[in-house]
């Protein structure tokens, strides 16, 4: 009886360990402070992005999240 309980416990532990090894790693978040693609293209051309959402975000001192940019999170 003791051996069967021990075998069940070991088997359960091995199954749990194997399931964690096949788990997909978590995706990392986008880097903080990344500009949107439209803003990067405009900067390469030597101008500022003319999208209304980007202009409004620039006035607030942020990157436009609507166009794919990210902002540094303040904690």
Image: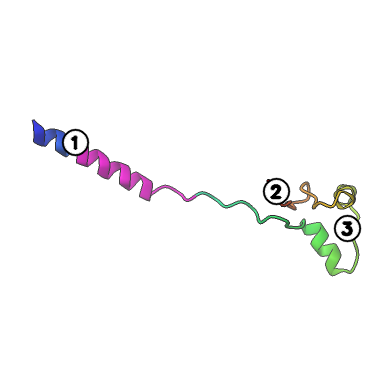
Q: Answer whether labels 3 and 1 touch (C-beta < 8 Å).
A: no
Q: Residues in magenta?
A: 9-25
Circles 2, 3 touching at the beta carbon (< 8 Å): no
Between 1 and 66, the residue placed more toward the observer is 1
Asked if disc 1 and disc 2 are in contact, CB closer than 8 Å, the reply is: no
Tell us which disc is closer to us: 3 or 1: 1
Q: Nearer the viewer, residue 75 or 51?
A: 75
Residue 59: image location, x then y, percent: 90, 50
Residue behind mark 2: 73
Give the side of residue 6 with respect to residue 60, left or right.
left
Camera-nearest label, 2 or 3: 2
Label of residue 45 in the image:
none
Q: How many other residues sit within 10 Å of disc 2, few (<14), some (14-19) or many (≥20)?
A: few
Q: Is residue 14 left or right of residue 50?
A: left
Front-most of 8 and 60? 60
Q: How far apart are labels 2 and 3 at the CA level?
A: 23 Å
Q: Quadrant of the N terminus?
A: top left
Q: Residue at x 78, y 50 (%)?
A: 67
Image quadrant holding the C terminus, namely: top right
User: What colour scheme does the image use?
Assistant: rainbow
Q: Is residue 11 magenta?
A: yes
Residue 19 location (% of width, % of height): 35, 44
| Disc 3 from disc 1: Cα separation | 63 Å
Between circles 1 and 2, the one closer to the viewer is 2
Q: Which residue does the numbered mark 3 point to in the structure image?
A: 49
Q: Earlier in the sequence, mark 2 or mark 3?
A: 3
Label 2: which secondary element: loop
* Image quarter of residue 5: top left
**Residue tagged 1:** 8
The image quarter in which residue 41 lies: bottom right
Question: Earlier along the polypeptide chain: callout 3 or callout 1?
Answer: 1
């Amino acid at each position: 009886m003791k051996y069967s309980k021990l075998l069940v416990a070991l088997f359960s532990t091995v199954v749990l360990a194997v399931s964690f090894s096949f788990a997909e790693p978590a995706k990392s978040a986008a880097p903080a402070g990344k500009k949107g693609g439209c803003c990067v293209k405009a900067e390469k051309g030597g101008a500022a992005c003319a999208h209304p959402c980007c202009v409004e975000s620039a006035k607030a001192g942020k990157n436009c999240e609507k166009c794919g940019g990210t902002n540094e999170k303040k904690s």
